[in-house]
Amino acid sequence: MPNDIVVIAGNSNVALATEICETLWQPLGLAQVRRFSDGEILIELGENVRGRDTFVIQSTCAPVNDNLMELLLIIDALKRASARRITAVIPYYGYARQDRKAAPRVPISAKLVADLLTAAGTTRVLAMDLHAGQIQGFFDIPVDHLFAAPVLLNYLKETYMKDGGEDVILVSPDAGGVERTRYLAKRLSAPLAIVDKRREAPNVAKVLNIIGDVKDRRALIIDDMVDTAGTLTQAANFIMELGAKDVSACATHPVLSGDALEKINASALSQVVVTNSIPLSGQGRDVAKIKVLSVASLLGEAIRRIHQEDSISSLFV
């Protein structure tokens, strides 16, 4: 890569950013993220970025507000240091589930985050598997929305379809995920089932029924994220009760909040495949059921094409 590109990592994605830089044959940009004793964040760029194409890699995962503020401050520092272009690379976009007014007198937090990023000086956003696709429209700047599907598809083909996969069925955990699951099912030439679920409160769901036949099949539950794992483990246990031979799960973002790891360990799930869009905690890395795939090459290729003004549309599918 030419030397007019700089890749900066926030604290949430240092390992992923390092992998991305390796795919670009590019050193990771020098930046220090420190804190004052009262908790305020101090950003210091360690190299000249004047007139250069800069990419800031930061997932706004837990601690969400700290990582979001850190991202905003890095962007502001780059803007004031006269960077030519500032692209926020956000593998996991926090607040994405608050994308509409689902009740009276509540904010549309995903829109507010978009406004904050734009006001800070972001000139382009590169995101992956947004919880709601309409978030792209919350920005008045270009947004490139990648999907981790190519990475997940390669793994599923090598692992579950190598023997033909005639007994594999893909399962959507809710009605909202049908399109995502149908996309993968079509490319794997596998049938589709849908979990009929009612959400009684935030992070609380109840499985009522499954549309489709999972008996004597290997079920793959497809979702965009695993948060508390309540929906996922409940669906997995129910699928096994209906006579499935095996049940696994595949998701892009391992949020894994609360007692999610305990639920996964105690569930009927044989494997949970996720990406490194969010780094696993030490406890998460110790869970044998969790398999992590890297999206570094996918993001690295997108960054290369953006920098060289090439089309990245082929990476969207």
Image: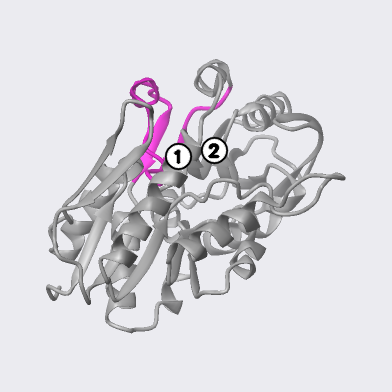
**Residue 293 lies in what quarter of the image?**
top left
Q: Which residues are magenta?
A: 268-293
Q: Is residue 136 visible?
A: yes
The residue to which callout 2 is attached is: 249
Could you tell me the amino acid type at mark 2? Ala
Does residue 270 show up magenta in the picture? yes
The residue to which callout 1 is attached is: 273
Task: Please state if 173 lies on the left or on the right of 69 as rendered.
Answer: right
**Count of numbered tags:** 2
Residue 172 in percent (x, y) is at: 67, 46
Task: Please state if 169 lies on the left or on the right of 79 as rendered.
Answer: right
Q: What SS does tag 1 mark?
A: strand
Residue at coordinates 73% horizontally, 44% vertically from top-left?
Answer: 174
Q: Is the Cβ of the residue at disc 1 closer than 8 Å to that at disc 2?
A: yes
In the rendered view, would you say 175 is above or below 145?
above
Q: What SS does tag 2 mark?
A: strand
Task: Please state if 135 lies on the left or on the right of 290 as rendered.
Answer: right
The residue positioned farthest toward the right in the image shown: 104
Residue at coordinates 34% horizontally, 61% vertically from top-left?
Answer: 299
Mark 1 or 2, nearer chain start:
2
Residue at coordinates 52% horizontally, 74% vertically from top-left?
Answer: 141
Residue at coordinates 26% horizontally, 44% vertically from top-left?
Answer: 14
Tag 2: Cα neighbours inside 10 Å, few (<14), some, or many (≥20)? many
Residue 62 in percent (x, y) is at: 47, 34
In the rendered view, would you say 11 is above or below 136?
above
Measured Cα–Cα span from mark 1 to mark 2: 6 Å
Residue 302 in percent (x, y) is at: 35, 69
